[in-house]
Amino acid sequence: MPKVLIADKLSPRAAKLFEERGVEVDVVHGLSEEDLVARMGDYDGLAVRSATKATAAVLEAGARGRLRVVGRAGIGVDNIDVPAATAHGVVVMNTPYGNAVTTAEHAIAMMFALARQLPAADRSTQAGKWEKSKFMGVELSGKTLGVIGCGNIGSIVCDRAHGLRMKVVAYDPFLSPDRAQDLGVEKVELEELLRRADIITLHVPLTDQTRGILDAEAMAKCRKGVLIVNCARGGLVVETDLKAALESGQVGGAALDVFEVEPAKENALFGTPNLICTPHLGASTAEAQENVALQVAEQMSDYLLTGA
Ligand code: MLT
């Protein structure tokens, strides 16, 4: 019987599904790299969310034993050393669909929070200030949303933005004209998106091509007062450049769920005016976590039991 280690907090239904399918499961959270290296040889599969790092040392230790698959309950595989896994013949799988709606909803929530200054208005009201005239907002209806990346999450953001009566322009080199038409978005080059968008939202992975896609030069090309939402990956927006742009007013507000260094317990951006931050909550809903846990358990069981 194959045996899997669930090393991060996943919905308990994942362990149940593994067992129902005939896969033995251990659930142990908070293991150090050393602990993982010591135990990994006993498992055919490792299931993680984002806390556990499947480093080269962990994968090598696993592959010396019987490790065949690492499953990421979520989208990004940043916490898995994929080249090391490949070198050892260990398959890496993710769940690209299970948390897409939830993450898109977080991006939309961030947009509203920026447009109506909700966190600052909440703090002020609960401090007894009743500063009604201080918090003048902007309507989203009629504004142009620039979506960078029109994959699983970005395309849901486009759909929701249409419901809000926004105009959507999208930059995505992989977006075909037919798909753009289906999504009802105008496909544009990055320069044009920067020039036209009232609000920019990012939905691309962090790669050598996308790192720093919103840097000082790009932000200078935007409309003055542009709002920026990043619920994708830290490193897409250059944080030092964003701080300067928020301070000068070139960027009117930014909502960040992700940071160059996480966990972001300290960050030079904190305290900058018109900045809203959340601690990488994009996928944090009960529904999404249930989806990704079940999907990863299903995929890993299929692979371990049938090789498919
Ligand atoms: C993902 O890659 O699935 C998201 O960033 C969510 C997460 O890591 O929790």
Image (cartoon, rainbow, N blue to C red):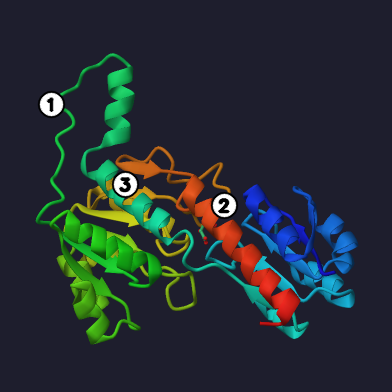
As shown in the figure, which amino acid type bears the numbered disc 2? Answer: Glu
As shown in the figure, which amino acid type bears the numbered disc 1? Answer: Ser
1 and 2 marks in contact (CB < 8 Å): no
Q: Quadrant of residue 238?
A: bottom left
- Residue picked out by circle 1: 133
Ligand 1 closer than 8 Å to label 1 CB: no
Q: Earlier in the sequence, mark 3 or mark 2?
A: 3
Q: CA distance from mark 3 to mark 2?
A: 21 Å
Image side of residue 72 versus residue 264, left or right: right
Residue drawn where x is 49% and y is 53% of the image: 288
Quick one: quadrant of the C terminus? Answer: bottom right
Q: Is residue 118 above or below residue 99?
A: above
- Residue picked out by circle 3: 109
Q: Secondary structure at mark 3?
A: helix
Q: Is residue 156 above or below residue 175?
A: above
Q: Earlier in the sequence, mark 1 or mark 2?
A: 1
Closer-to-camera residue (33/295) = 295
Q: Secondary structure at mark 2?
A: loop
Residue drawn where x is 33% and y is 17% of the image: 127
Percent x, y for residue 33? 80, 58
Quick one: quadrant of the N terminus? Answer: bottom right
Q: Quadrant of residue 195?
A: bottom left
Q: Earlier in the sequence, mark 1 or mark 3?
A: 3
Q: Secondary structure at mark 1?
A: loop
- Residue picked out by circle 2: 262
Image side of residue 10 versus residue 230, left or right: right
1 and 3 marks in contact (CB < 8 Å): no
Q: CA distance from mark 1 to mark 3?
A: 23 Å
